[in-house]
Amino acid sequence: MKLTITSILVLLVMSSCASKKDILYMQDAERLDGAVLNYTDPTIQPNDILKITVASAMPEAAMLYNKAGAQGMQVQNIQLLQLDGYLVSLEHTISFPVLGEISTLNKTTYQLAAELTSLLKSGDHLKDATVNVRLLNAKVTILGQVNSPGTYSFTEQNITVLQALGYANDLTINGKRDDILITREENGIRKIAHIDLTSAQFLNSEFYFVKPNDVIVVNPNNPQVKQAGFIGNVGTILTIASLALSITILLSR
């Protein structure tokens, strides 16, 4: 009887422990050393806020196409920039001075800048126009077993899922590293992916680079789920097993 209880105790403790292969990131990273990166620019989505700056050899000629915040004013607050930006409508359009309604559907910021430049030149509006388009409200939401869950803004054109998790101060020791959930809404379609951080294969995934408005969810690993269950943590298991052993000894006398 003592042997049976001891065996059960050992099994319970072992089942509540995470192994090395469940914790280490990219354990086979050497296999992808030297791989070529495929950078992709995200397409503009409804509710994106764009900063559009038009430049010319004659600044006075370009003033008509620039909002106040783009005309040399030093605006430090990103929220003020957003208020002065172009909000993309649910119909994938923006209203641009002189040119009117401009479609943003399936366009990147680079492609929109090229189109605006072409329209200004071909329409004899501004012969030497140079247009720059930046996304002002790119953000990623990170939830679950991370040290600092929340929504984080970023200004880079491309950030990786590892960089995004770095904003959240990494996964906790209880985070399930082999099944990170990512949801993405793009062009009216929702995509859901599961990536395994313990293998470097996710580096080749389309979800390696984060896109604006992605949601990353880190679920608890099996030991954490068991600890939150009916049996409880290892200390509780030891207490129950010790009590059971004591009762068995008393009854066997």
Image (cartoon, grey):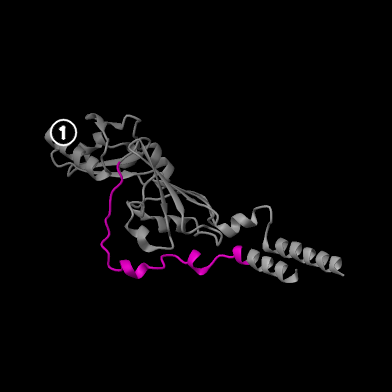
Q: Image point 32% across, 29% down: which residue?
A: 91
Left or right of 229, for residue 101: left
* Rendering coords of residue 34 (x, y %): 27, 68
Left or right of 19, for residue 48: left
Q: Image point 83% across, 64% down: which residue?
A: 247
* Rendering coords of residue 84 (x, y %): 37, 37
Q: Image point 27% across, 42% down: which residue?
A: 53
Q: Is residue 55 visible?
A: no
Bin the neighbour count of mark 1 within 10 Å (Cα to Cα): few under 14, some 14-19, many 20 and up: some
Which stretch did the figure color magenta?
Answer: 14-43
What count of labels does the image hold? 1
- Is 160 magenta? The answer is no
Q: Which residue, given by chain and number where applicable, does mark 1 sit on?
A: 125
Assign the C terminus to one quadrant of the image. Answer: bottom right
The one nearer the camera, 172 or 117, is: 172
Q: Is residue 204 visible?
A: yes
* Rendering coords of residue 101 (x, y %): 26, 28
User: Which quadrant of the structure image shows residue 123?
Assistant: top left
